[in-house]
Image (tube, rainbow, N blue to C red):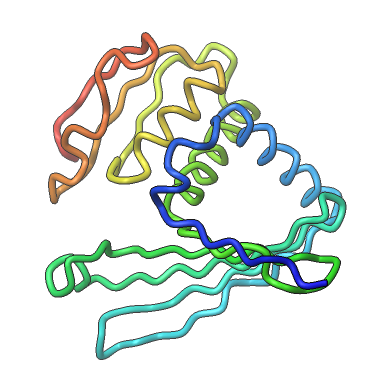
């Protein structure tokens, strides 16, 4: 019997995930990948040169977790000025491994932010020195706050960031004193 297809917009998703849960899931997904139990072909690209855009297609399958999805990310540099849209637009399609039918189509910006932040958090957990207490975040636009939250949830307690943002998009994206961490904003590199 066919399932009902769920469609989730950005407003349905924003703030619904706890970074600690995402960190745990990403760590497990990395372990699955390390044991050769994932299927993640290289990205495919569709180029739209006359529109200064590209579409990235990223399928993934975690058989042991019984999860499969395809993420579509379009990068169109003229979107903000010409169309009032973000440069990056992400869409995620969850697929039932059992039947192959789409289960959910969702806006992918928030999920991508959480996932990317969690990847950095897991990397920090395993690769940073135990006594490391300073972290630089360069280019801290949309992704910056997710990176910061992941670091805090990965048990880092002092953060320095440099937005490295020539367009000013990162201005105000961090709340000083959030979670009791020190935030130092340096000059643009």
Query: Above or below — where is 89 with respect to 135?
Result: below
| Residue 57 place in picture, x, y as percent | 55, 74
Which residue corresponds to the image point at 50% horizontal and 42% vertical from the top-left?
114
Which quadrant would residue 99 be assigned to in this image? bottom right
User: Is 102 placed above or below 45 here?
Assistant: above
Q: Residue at point 25% right, 90% down?
A: 50
Tell me if residue 114 comes above or below residue 155 in the rendering.
below
Number of disc labels: 0
Nearest the eye: 184 or 178: 178
The spot of residue 88 in percent (x, y) is: 34, 63
Q: Residue at x 79, y 58 (%)?
A: 38
In the rendered image, which quarter is residue 86 located in? bottom left
Residue found at x 40% / y 25% = 135
On the rendered structure, is 64 left or right of 91?
right
Q: Position of residue 148 (x, y in %)?
A: 40, 29
Please give left or right for residue 75 compared with residue 169 in the image: right
- In what quadrant of the picture does the C terminus appear? top left
Q: Quadrant of the N terminus?
A: bottom right
Looking at the image, residue 30 sits to the left or right of residue 82; the answer is right
Image x and y of residue 182, in percent: 31, 13
Taking depth in this image into account, of 60 and 13 the one nearest to the observer is 13
């Amino acid at each position: 019997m066919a399932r009902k297809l769920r469609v989730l917009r950005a407003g349905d998703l924003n703030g619904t995930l706890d970074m600690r849960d995402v960190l745990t899931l990403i760590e497990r997904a990395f372990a699955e990948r390390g044991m050769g139990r994932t299927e993640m072909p290289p990205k495919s690209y569709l180029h739209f040169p006359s529109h200064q855009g590209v579409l990235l297609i990223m399928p993934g399958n975690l058989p042991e977790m019984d999860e499969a999805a395809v993420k579509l990310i379009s990068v169109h540099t003229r979107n903000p000025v010409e169309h009032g849209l973000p440069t990056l637009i992400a869409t995620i399609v969850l697929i039932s491994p059992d039947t192959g039918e789409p289960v959910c189509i969702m806006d992918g910006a928030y999920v991508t932010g959480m996932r990317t932040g969690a990847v950095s958090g897991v990397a920090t957990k395993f690769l940073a020195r135990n006594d490391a207490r300073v972290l630089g975040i360069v280019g801290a636009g949309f992704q910056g706050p997710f990176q910061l939250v992941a670091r805090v949830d990965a048990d880092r307690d002092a953060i320095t960031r440099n937005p490295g943002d020539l367009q000013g998009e990162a201005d105000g994206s961090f709340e000083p004193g959030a979670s009791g961490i020190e935030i130092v904003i340096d000059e643009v590199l």
